[in-house]
Structure formats: C-alpha cells, structure tokens
Image: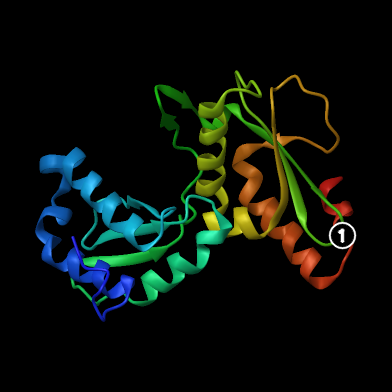
Amino acid sequence: MWSRFSRKSKEEQFWDWFVRHEEKLLNFEVDQERIFDKLANALQRVDRDLTFEFGPPEARRELVISAAGIKRAFPAVSALVAAAPALERWRWTAFRPRRPVGNPVEFRGKCIYPKDLEFALLDDGKIAGLHLFLPNFRDDDVTVKMIGYLLLDEALGEFDVVTRLGFIEMHAPDATTIGTRYPFVKLPRLFDQLNLQLERGESPRSLLAR
C-alpha cells in the first residue's frame, strides 16, 4: 500500500492513498464491503486502533475518524485529521460526534432503541460518572455492552465519553444502584449541566436531586 521507508509521515501516506481512491470511497455503496476493508487497513497502518464511519449523505460526504473509544489512540486521530487535505466533496471529523438521540443502534444482530434506556449521573466533585441501564443486559454480553458504548458516543460524542466520564457502569433495568434515573434522551442536557457546574467548582448534587 505504501512504503515504511518513505520520507512522508504515516498521516501523509494515508491521505495520499485516500486521494488516489477518492472516487471509490465517495461512492462506497457500489462495493461497500471491499472498500470498507481497504479503508480499515489503511487506517490501521497509521494506528492499529483507528476506525471510521461515514456521516449521513449530504452535499459534502463526512468521514469520521475514531479511536474506537481507546484513549491511547486519541493523539493519532487528532494528528490524522490535522493532516487532512482540503477536498471539496469531503469534510473530516475527529472522533465520533454527537448525533440526535433517538435512532436505534444495531450491532452483531442485536438492536437497542434509546427510548428503552435509562441512566443515572453521579460525581465526586471533580468528574462525572454514569450508570447505564440496558434491556436484556448481562455482564458477559459483549455485544450489548458495545451497543451501550455506541449509544453513549451518539449522545455525548466519543471525546466526552472518554475524557469527561470517570466511570461507566452498565446494568440490567432491575439493578439496584444509587442516583436518580432519567430517560436516556435527557442525557446530553444533564451531562452538560453537570460538567458546567463541575468546571465552576459548584456543588452539582443539587442538579441531580431535581
């Protein structure tokens, strides 16, 4: 694909590859599986944990570069997007962005709707923590856990999920935990309010008790 002996950086080599394959990537629906495999391989030559997603069809096609929630790979995402060329038919996004809450997430044959979720926010005075209650959750069910993280990324954005939550615990709906439960659709607003109070050094517990 490209040479490790090239004087160009890994980021530059990736974008050279991308430009050469721009037409196929822009119209990936024609041969989606093959094109996605090639793009995944190209990204993993930059960093083994990088992944991607395409945004909704618009005038300019969005390519999201993600670290798959792995904090170690965050600098690789930032460096790759910073090195991206200006292409008139594309826009680049570092980390999975927030999306409107409401769309179901399907993964490995399982599907969860946000309307069926609840959450509880906690804090230690410095950083927030989260209990997430998922239907049909079992502690050994990796697929449901992955859907939970994807739903959190959609609600809060990948960057905030990794950097502004001290812990994330997932539970079945009948689990007993502390903290007031709310419908999942309220998570972005309450999360932002809580973090604003934490940044100001104010006591956030009054918010959670409302």
Residue 43 vs 79, above or below: the answer is: above
At 29% from the left and 67% from the top, the residue drawn is: 91
Measured from the top left, where is residue 150 in percent x and y? Answer: 50, 41
Q: Amino acid at mark 1?
A: Gly
Residue 178 vs 67, above or below: the answer is: above
Residue 64 vs 5, above or below: the answer is: above
At 81% from the left and 72% from the top, the residue drawn is: 200
Q: Quadrant of the N terminus?
A: bottom left
Measured from the top left, where is residue 173 in percent x and y? Answer: 70, 22
**Label 1: which secondary element:** loop
Q: Is residue 77 left or right of residue 10?
A: right
Q: Which residue occupies the foreground of this view, 42 or 54? A: 42
Measured from the top left, where is residue 193 in percent x and y? Answer: 72, 59
Q: Is residue 207 left or right of residue 34?
A: right
At 27% from the left and 75% from the top, the residue drawn is: 12
Measured from the top left, where is residue 85 in percent x and y? Answer: 25, 76
Q: Is residue 94 left or right of residue 58?
A: right
> Mark 1 = which residue?
125
Color style of the picture:
rainbow
At 27% from the left and 69% from the top, the residue drawn is: 4
